[in-house]
Image (spheres, rainbow, N blue to C red):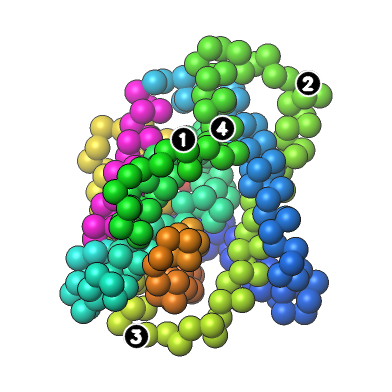
């Protein structure tokens, strides 16, 4: 059976990068004015190249049913998480106009990308990672459509918000795989794509650490928010995701992706959405910081138990 300590060893580099980002910010090597330019390059160039490199040649993505299920499940499970967040938010006394929507979205949305990708690759390898990028199309679609409607009260979905580098890269990669043209991208061109993408997630995680240390102390923690969000993000939502991984008729690779997604803390996307669309950023900040710290303890146990319950064997001793 997989050991929690083996999982800790596999995910520890991610948390060390977060800490390194925080330290580099504190000592002034990475300044706030660097963040936007660095993340623009990471998000628009490096991550799309990394995604394309992993998708090309992935045999699991040749199945249209697996791709479709992955997108739909990514969409549906995020909405399920938000619904759980809304119920718990009500139970702890939040109301519309007083932080309920921000709580529901923030606690219901896991860190599905930057933190999850290195963990998926470490535990399961390239096939699961390629499928995770497809799964994340559904997550992105849910957040930037229904998620924004919840946060802002808008009634119209603006699908153009989904046109970005990662979505374009995944769509292009899937098209090439379906047509059987992915093996034509080889040699120096493929090597250049790989070289551009190799540092994408380490740099993104480093900047995430910088952003987190900026948020520390910006808002006084509220006990009911921290405890309520931990119950949603680290207990109830993982149970829902792991149940889907065990009982739905899906591929092994998608089950592997969902086990890691279940263990993730809240994602920083919710802070961005709260700031952009009239939410309560203070609540989102507390949820992200609180669940990230607590996930140091819960993450290895969720992954270990999930693997044993579902019957998965990671690429670990």
Question: What residue span does the magenta drawing correspond to?
Answer: 65-84
Q: Secondary structure at mark 2?
A: helix
Q: Earlier in the sequence, mark 4 or mark 2?
A: 4
Report the residue at 75% width, 71% height from top: 31
Magenta stretch prevailing secondary structure: helix
User: Circle 4 is placed at which residue position?
Assistant: 168
Category of crowding for the residue at label 4, using alpha-carbon neighbours closer than 10 angstroms: few (below 14), some (14–19), many (at least 20): some
Residue 131 visible in this rendered orientation of the protein: yes
In the rendered image, residue 101, in percent from the top left (x then y), is placed at: 30, 65
State the residue at coordinates (77%, 24%). 189
Q: Secondary structure at mark 4?
A: helix
Name the secondary structure under disc 3.
Answer: helix
The answer to whether residue 35 is left or right of residue 109 is right
174 shown above or below 38: above
Task: Give whichever of 194, 246 is nearer the camera.
Answer: 194
Residue, disc 1: 134
């Amino acid at each position: 059976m997989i050991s929690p300590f083996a999982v800790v060893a596999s995910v520890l580099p991610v948390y060390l990068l977060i800490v390194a980002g925080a330290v580099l910010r504190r000592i002034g090597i990475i300044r706030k004015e660097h963040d936007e330019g660095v993340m623009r390059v990471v998000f628009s160039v490096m991550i799309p190249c990394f995604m394309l490199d992993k998708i090309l040649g992935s045999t699991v993505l040749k199945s249209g049913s697996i791709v479709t299920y992955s997108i739909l499940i990514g969409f549906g499970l995020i909405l399920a998480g938000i619904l759980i967040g809304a119920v718990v938010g009500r139970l702890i006394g939040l109301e519309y106009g007083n932080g309920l929507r921000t709580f529901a979205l923030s606690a219901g949305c896991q860190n599905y990308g930057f933190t999850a990708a290195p963990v998926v690759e470490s535990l399961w390898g390239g096939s699961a990672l390629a499928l995770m990028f497809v799964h994340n199309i559904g997550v992105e679609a849910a957040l930037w459509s229904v998620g924004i409607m919840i946060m802002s009260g808008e009634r119209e979905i603006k699908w153009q918000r989904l046109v970005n580098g990662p979505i374009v890269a995944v769509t292009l990669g899937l098209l090439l795989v379906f047509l059987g043209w992915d093996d034509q991208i080889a040699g120096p061109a493929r090597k250049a794509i790989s070289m551009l993408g190799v540092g994408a997630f380490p740099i993104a995680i480093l900047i995430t650490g910088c952003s987190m240390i900026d948020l520390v102390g910006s808002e006084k923690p509220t006990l009911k928010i921290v405890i309520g969000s931990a119950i949603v993000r680290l207990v109830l939502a993982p149970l829902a995701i792991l149940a889907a991984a065990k009982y739905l008729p899906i591929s092994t690779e998608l089950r592997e992706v969902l086990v890691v997604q279940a263990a993730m803390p809240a994602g920083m996307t919710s802070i961005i959405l709260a700031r952009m669309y009239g939410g309560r950023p203070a609540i989102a900040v507390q949820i992200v910081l609180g669940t990230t710290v607590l996930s140091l303890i819960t993450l290895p146990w969720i992954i270990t138990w999930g693997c044993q319950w579902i019957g998965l064997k990671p690429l670990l001793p």
